Image (tube, helix red, strand yellow):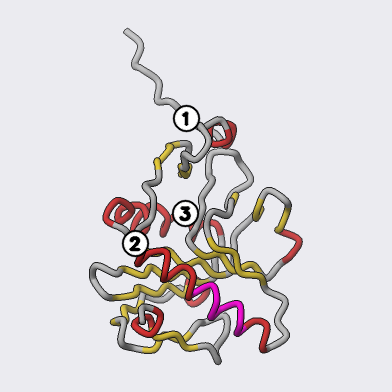
Amino acid sequence: MALPQELIYTTEDIYSLPEGQRAELIDGQMYMMAPPNRIHQKLVSNFTKIIGMHIDSKGGTCEVYPAPFAVFVTEDDTNYVEPDISVICDKSKLTDKGCNGAPDWIIEIVSTSSQKMDYSLKNALYTEAGVREYWIVDPQKQCATIYHYEEDAAPIIYTFEQPVRANIYPDLKITVSELLK
């Protein structure tokens, strides 16, 4: 008797979803996305503003994109994510559809429904894809877990009250609690 085959989804399946329905793909598995809450959106908005203003003030060329923004982190069509915030410094990765390849810096705001995705599945995907820096901001735990993949070091956990230095912008420090005011 033949074993049932596991269904592998592709980006074609993502683009076939009904209008307004969002999902991500990791290794061909589809994960539906729940609508974000107000705190989540406030953090995304304020992170985007702070990072964008910093880039502009330094005359930088990197670009910051809040979700929904398509990121195709691998060359195959079985991985498609919409990080809450993506900072891309290599403009050759940008197309009208999104980003082809790893952003330099990704920030994910954790929600109850995304914990496993953000801490485990996306963490593995992002490190393998070549993301330089990954922040997991967890409003429930009031902490941010920071990965500097280039340094191959253990993650550092900060409370929302502690300033966090962005590795790709050493002169940028963000205190998450300030973004919630």
The C terminus is located in which quarter? bottom left
Report x, y in % for residue 114.
Answer: 33, 53
Residue at horizontal 47%, vertical 44%?
Answer: 24
First in sequence: mark 1 vs mark 2: 1
Residue at horizontal 24%, vertical 67%?
Answer: 140
Magenta stretch in the rendered image: 47-54
- For disc 3, the neighbor class at 10 Å (few under 14, some 14 to 19, many from 20) is some
Disc 2 on helix, strand or loop? loop
Are the two marked residues, 1 and 3, in contact with CB atoms closer than 8 angstroms?
Answer: no
| Residue 8 numbered tag | 1
- For disc 1, the neighbor class at 10 Å (few under 14, some 14 to 19, many from 20) is few
**Residue 27 visible in this rendered orientation of the protein:** no
Report x, y in % for residue 117.
Answer: 36, 52
- Amino acid of disc 1: Ile
Which residue is situated farthest in the bottom direction here? 171
Q: Which residue is mark 3?
A: 125
Disc 3 on helix, strand or loop? helix
Q: Which residue is mark 2?
A: 110
Residue 61 in the image: above or below residue 90: below
Report which quarter residue 36 is drawn in: bottom left
Of badges 3 and 2, the one in the foreground is: 2
Q: Main secondary structure of the magenta part?
A: helix
Q: Nearer the viewer, residue 111 or 135?
A: 111
**Residue 136 visible in this rendered orientation of the protein:** yes
- Amino acid of disc 2: Val
- Amino acid of disc 3: Leu
